[in-house]
């Protein structure tokens, strides 16, 4: 199965991420469109300033998300809806963690990398269960994860609201 929901999923995720932030309580530090200053510097290969981060545009960050997150997690090979959940959590919680959450649900080795074995096990899993069940399980794992974080008291309400919105969007993608 190959699809291309990238633009739709990116639009949803960027809406969730919003723009530039530099909250001292956020361990990610300076962030814009969900990309931390550290990750952007790694991607562009040189140091960037807070001003550089503020100047990022959707056009500038789209290739980053396509190569560093979407393609890395083989999202084009994931069923519609599951691709959104995996992509959104990769942006918010890290690609490896997102892959491991999916792998845990389907009984794959939790190596943090989605490859042919994970795709095969996912397809087998959803043939016995459903895409809806997989989305619900994935989002429930996210809730438990966020509740375990030390910054939950600061950001938790927003995180859980995001999980709900992404779950609803993902479900609408399979209907």
Image: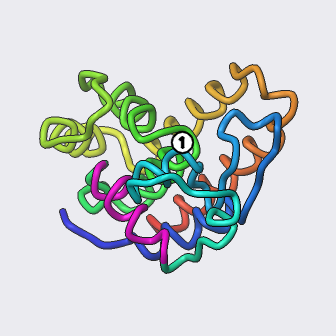
State the image coordinates of residue 89 (x, y, percent, origin top left).
Answer: 52, 45
Q: Quadrant of residue 2?
A: bottom left
- Mark 1 residue element: helix
- Relative vertical location of residue 169 with respect to residue 78 in this rendering, above or below: below
Question: Looking at the picture, how far across and down is residue 94, in whole percent?
Answer: 48, 39
Front residue of 162 and 94: 94
- Residue picked out by circle 1: 136
Residue 25 is covered by the magenta coloring: no
Dominant SS of magenta comes to helix
Residue 103 is situated, as x and y percent measured from the top left of the image, at 33, 30
Coordinates of residue 130 in the picture (x, y in percent): 37, 46
Q: Nearer the viewer, residue 164 or 133?
A: 164
Residue 162 placement, left or right of 52? right
The residue range painted magenta reads 60-72
Q: Residue at x 25, y 40 (%)?
A: 114
Furthest-bottom residue in this view: 59
Q: How is the image coloured?
A: rainbow
The residue depicted at 69 percent of the width and 49 percent of the height is 30
Residue 1 or residue 32, whichever sits in front: 32
């Amino acid at each position: 199965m190959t699809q291309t929901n990238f633009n739709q999923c990116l639009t949803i995720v960027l809406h969730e991420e919003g723009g530039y932030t530099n909250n001292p309580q956020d361990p990610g530090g300076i962030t814009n469109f969900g990309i931390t200053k550290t990750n952007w510097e790694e991607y562009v290969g040189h140091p960037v300033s807070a001003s550089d981060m503020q100047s990022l545009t959707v056009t500038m960050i789209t290739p980053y998300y396509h190569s560093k997150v979407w393609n890395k997690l083989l999202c084009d090979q994931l069923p519609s809806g599951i691709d959104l959940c995996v992509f959104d959590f990769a942006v918010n919680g890290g690609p490896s963690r997102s892959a491991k959450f999916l792998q845990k649900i389907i009984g794959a080795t939790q190596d943090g990398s989605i490859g042919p074995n994970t795709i095969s096990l996912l397809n087998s899993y959803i043939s016995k269960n459903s895409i809806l069940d997989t989305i619900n399980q994935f989002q429930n794992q996210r809730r438990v994860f966020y509740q375990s974080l030390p910054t939950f008291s600061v950001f938790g309400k927003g995180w859980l609201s995001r999980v709900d919105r992404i779950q609803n969007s993902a479900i609408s993608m399979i209907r």
